[in-house]
Every structure is written in structure tokens, then in C-alpha cells.
Amino acid sequence: MASEFDLIDRYFKRRTPDGMLGVGDDCALFGVPAGMKVATSTDLLIEGRHFFPDVDPRALGHKSLAVNVSDLAAMGARPIGCLLGLALPQPREDWLSAFAEGFHGMADAAGCPLIGGDTTGNPGALAISVTVFGAVRAEAALRRDAARVGDDIWVSGTLGEADIAYRLMSGQMPPDDGLLACVRQALEWPQPRFALGQALAGIAHAAIDISDGLLQDLGHILKASRVGARLRMADMPVSPALAGVPAARLRHAVLAGGDAYELCFTAPGDRADAVRAAAARAGVAVTRIGSVEAGTGVTVLDAQGIPMTDLPAGFDHFRSP
Ligand code: ADP
Ligand code: MG
């Protein structure tokens, strides 16, 4: 059996970029350019709660970093590096090797190298803690409290796929292998919008990444900014893969589905062309779905322009479903 240090060397120690000190010392070292702030965020993933125990370890490695990189994107920050804490029931090398491959793949794609961490055995559930660091100009950071009345509300990519994948895999929808094959990738291999987030810094006002559902996450922006919003259901970028999903289920997936890791952001109406240019540079589709208004809360207009009632809520760990 390899020692803890052999395993770290084998799977987690990689060459770090010039000017940084990575895995192997008491601390990692990195700097940020003058005039920039460090953006940092951490997420904890627990087996059985955030992922299925039998999930592909490569996908799990990818997703544990992806959800953190998504937070940097939602701040408009450029990734610098990350830390990985692992509590492992038993250190199986085939599992570690696949997990590390998925993790480093995401790290390479986002320019967010693994620069340290901690590894421990734990007879209970597998737990994964990732912390990311990024850099952002303070005045350009996409803060939740920065939405203004009159801003347009935008969302990147499409909505609904990850939620439908989760419902299918957890048995909350009747089995449909054809549909699952189309949507599973969205749940297990989310693509954080780090290029878009950086491109929007200095253009957009407020942003958040959609982890708990559009309405709930947008709600955080509205509350922090002390404003309300009006959305148009007909303008939502619904994934075309979901064409056969029953209407009520689909509406719920689009408005309240979690794990999307798309960006929801607000920008002044006269910056719409700049938003579109930023999205084109980042290679991501963006859609205008509504506007920020005075007041509180969200109104969603249906296809006839009538406010929808019984809007679904998003995910909350401390509230029963
Ligand atoms: P310490 O006892 O000082 O906490 P450790 O023995 O825990 O040091 O870790 C040794 C080195 O390996 C450190 O540089 C640490 O950052 C790194 N490390 C440990 N576990 C991981 C991990 N899961 N991923 C990346 N680096 C790790
Ligand atoms: Mg340690």
C-alpha cells in the first residue's frame, strides 16, 4: 500500500506555473498583479448528498473543481489556483487516478492549477473540499449587490438539462434512457463559464452562478441589491433536448433546477452590445430574459404576458422539499 505522501506525489503534485509555489511545501505561494484583489471561495461535496456514491470518479474530479471555478466566474475573476481537501474511506489507487485525471483536466482548462491540499482517511462517507483563488479588479468585480433598476437580466447557455438528469437518475421521473443520454453530461460534467465571467467584468453589474435554481439564485442578487425583477418565460433559453418533457416538469427544471452552473447577470440596457461581444469572445450564448425593477421579488410573465402563480422554489439544504 502506498503511503499518503506517495499518493500525493503521484496524483496531486504537478508542475506549477512560474512564479508560484505548489504542492510539497507547508504553504503554496502566489501573487496577484498590483491593483487586483484576491477572490476566494470554497465548496464542500459529500457523498450521498452532492453526488451519487457510484458516480464516475473522473466526472467527480471534474465537477468538484468546476463548481468552484464557477464561483470565480460569477465574480468576474481570473482563476489563479486551487486547494483540494480529501477525506477518503479507503485510498483505492484506480479511483484516485481517475479522480485526479478529471480534476487536473478541469484545472488545465480553466488555468487553475492545484497548488496544495490535505488528505486524510475517514471510515465514513467520502468528502471533498475545494478552495479556489482568483484575481479581479475590485471595481470590476461582479458583486451580488450591484444590480440597478433598469438593468437587463441575462443568462448564459441553456437551462433545465442538469435538473432533468438528476430527476431521471434519482427515480423522480419515469426511466427514459434516450433522454438521460442527452442530459447526463450537463449534470456530471458542468462547464463553468470562466471566460464569460472575466469578459463581463467591467461591463455587467451583478452576477451569480446558478447552482440552486434560477429564481432562487437571482433572488440573492435582488435581495442584496434591494430591487425586484420581471422575467419573460417565453424568452428562457430552454435546452432543445428537453422538447419532450411534460410542461410542468420543464417549467420547474428551467426556473428552479439546480446544478446548471450557468451565469445569471445584470447589465445596463445600453451595454447590451458589449455583453453580446463579450459572450462572442468567450464562445458562450447569452439570452436576455427580463429586467430589474424597483420593488422586491420576481414576477415571471407567461407566454400571454400574465404573471405566473405558484412559482417553484429552488434548493435549500435546511428546508424540506
Ligand atoms: P502538512 O502536514 O504541513 O499539512 P501535508 O503532509 O498535509 O502537510 O501535505 C504535504 C503537501 O502535500 C502540502 O504541500 C499539501 O499542500 C500537499 N497536499 C496534501 N494533500 C493534497 C491534496 N489532496 N491535493 C493537493 N495537495 C495536497
Ligand atoms: Mg496537511
Image (cartoon, grey):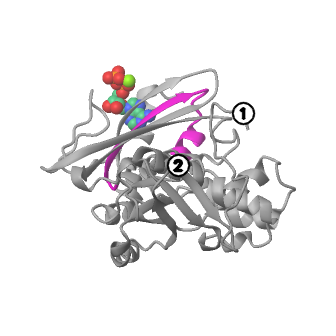
Q: Quadrant of residue 253?
A: bottom right
Position of residue 43 relative to residue 279, above or below, is above
The residue pinned by badge 2 equals 219
Rendered view: 226 above or below 203: above
User: Is residue 98 found inside the magenta-colored segment of the image?
Assistant: yes
Give residue 236's position: percent from left, percent from top.
60, 69
Q: Which residue sits at x=42%, y=50%?
A: 69
Please name the amino acid that badge 2 sits on: Gly
Disc tally is 2
Q: Which residues are magenta?
A: 76-99
Specify whether residue 251 is painted magenta. no
Residue 155 in sight: no
Residue of label 1: 320
- Taking 86 as reference, is 277 left or right? left
Q: Is residue 156 left or right of residue 112?
A: right
Q: 120 or 281, which is in the foreground?
A: 281
Residue 174 got which mark?
Answer: none
Q: Is label 1's Cβ within 8 Å of ligand 1?
A: no
Q: Quadrant of ligand 2?
A: top left
Q: Amino acid at mark 1?
A: Ser
The furthest residue to the front: 295
The percent coordinates of residue 151 (x first, y second) are 40, 64
Name the N-terminal-most of marks 1 and 2: 2
Tag 1 secondary structure:
loop
Q: Are marks 1 and 2 in contact (CB under 8 Å)?
A: no
Label 2 SS: helix
Crowd rating for badge 1 (residues with CA inside 10 Å; few <14, some 14–19, many 20+) = few
User: Which residue lies at the image location 59% right of the left edge and 53% below the top edge?
Assistant: 215
